[in-house]
């Protein structure tokens, strides 16, 4: 039963989470650029960007809140960063909808962007200014939705979390078991179906990432289900 355990290399640290919110690369970059005009009075973006009233927004994805060097953040943002807030598509979406709901003491005098489509477009635009933007849907776990055509029988498999724990050792050399994020997305407490869908999308080469396609291709259905079951309930 426990066949195919190795080689699970340290590259397993690149495994990605999958949000149920659908961004799915569906953001319109041109529309996002227009939405960014609401932000550019305080934030710069692109070549030569500097801190202004707010920090520059280059390399935003995967950056801890209050993580831009040499910018004086409010205590509220510093607390959020210390508490583990990292900017990915889902956290940006929540923040952009109502900044003060996430960081109540922020100095940011912005009411938020109420239309989900506008936020999705802006997030897609911001993604273009992070490192290796073509890879961010793979490096940033929330950039894809959960639409799929996976066999229901695969989703119905009941993964063994103890088996998943056995398999997980090389995952947690990169992904923090406590759920933290040090530039590699957390995989703790993912919904099982999302984990399984993501891994099978790599396995079936429907998600384009050569490393993940290779790793997922070595895992059997039971192994994927077991890892999903383990990380779905893992707590600090």
Image (cartoon, helix red, strand yellow):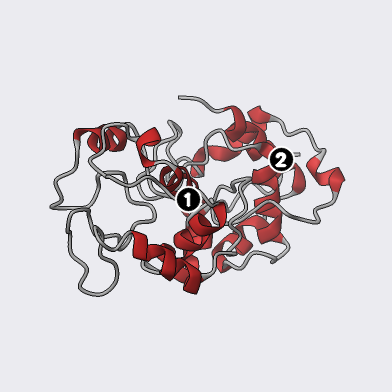
Crowd tier of the residue under label 1, counting other residues whose Cα lies within 10 Å: few below 14, some 14–19, many 20 or above: many
In this rendering, position of residue 67 left or right of residue 99:
left
- Distance from disc 1 to disc 2, alpha carbons, whole Å, reads 18 Å
Which residue carries the number 2 mark?
A: 225
Give the SS element for disc 1: helix
54 with respect to 221 (left or right): left
Residue 39 vertical position relative to residue 159 in the rendered view, above or below: below
Q: Secondary structure at mark 2?
A: helix
**Above or below, 140 relative to 100:** below
Q: Residue at x 52, y 41 (%)?
A: 187
Q: At 42% across and 46% down in the image, what residue appears?
A: 174
Pointer 2 local density, CA inside 10 Å: few below 14, some 14–19, many at least 20: many
Closer-to-camera residue (16/221): 16
Name the residue beneath numbered marker 1. Answer: 13
Look at 64% across and 28% down and name the residue there: 162
Frontmost residue, 70 versus 156: 70
Tell which of 128 and 208 is nearer to you: 128
Residue 96: % across, % down = 42, 48
The numbered mark, 1 or 2, whose residue comes first in the sequence reads 1
């Amino acid at each position: 039963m426990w066949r195919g355990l190795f080689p699970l290399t340290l590259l397993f640290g690149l495994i990605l989470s999958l949000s149920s919110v659908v961004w799915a690369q569906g953001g319109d970059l041109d529309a996002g650029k227009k939405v960014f005009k609401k932000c550019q009075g305080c934030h710069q973006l692109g070549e030569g960007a500097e801190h202004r009233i707010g920090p520059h927004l280059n390399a935003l994805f995967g950056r801890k809140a209050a993580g831009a060097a040499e910018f004086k953040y409010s205590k509220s943002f510093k607390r959020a960063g210390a508490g583990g807030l990292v900017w990915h598509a889902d956290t940006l979406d929540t923040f952009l909808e109502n900044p003060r709901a996430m960081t109540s003491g922020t100095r940011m005098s912005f009411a938020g962007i109420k239309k989900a489509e506008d936020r999705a477009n802006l997030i897609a635009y911001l993604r273009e200014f992070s490192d290796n933007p073509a890879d961010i849907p793979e490096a940033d776990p929330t950039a894809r939705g959960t639409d799929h055509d996976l066999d229901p029988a695969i989703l119905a498999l009941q993964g063994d979390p103890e088996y998943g724990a056995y398999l997980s050792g090389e995952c947690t050399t990169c992904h923090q078991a406590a759920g933290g994020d040090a530039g590699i997305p957390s995989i703790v407490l993912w919904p099982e179906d999302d984990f399984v869908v993501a891994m099978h999308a790599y396995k079936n080469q429907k998600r384009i990432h050569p490393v993940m396609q290779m790793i997922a291709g070595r895992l059997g259905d039971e192994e994927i289900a077991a890892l999903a079951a383990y990380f779905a309930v893992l707590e600090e």
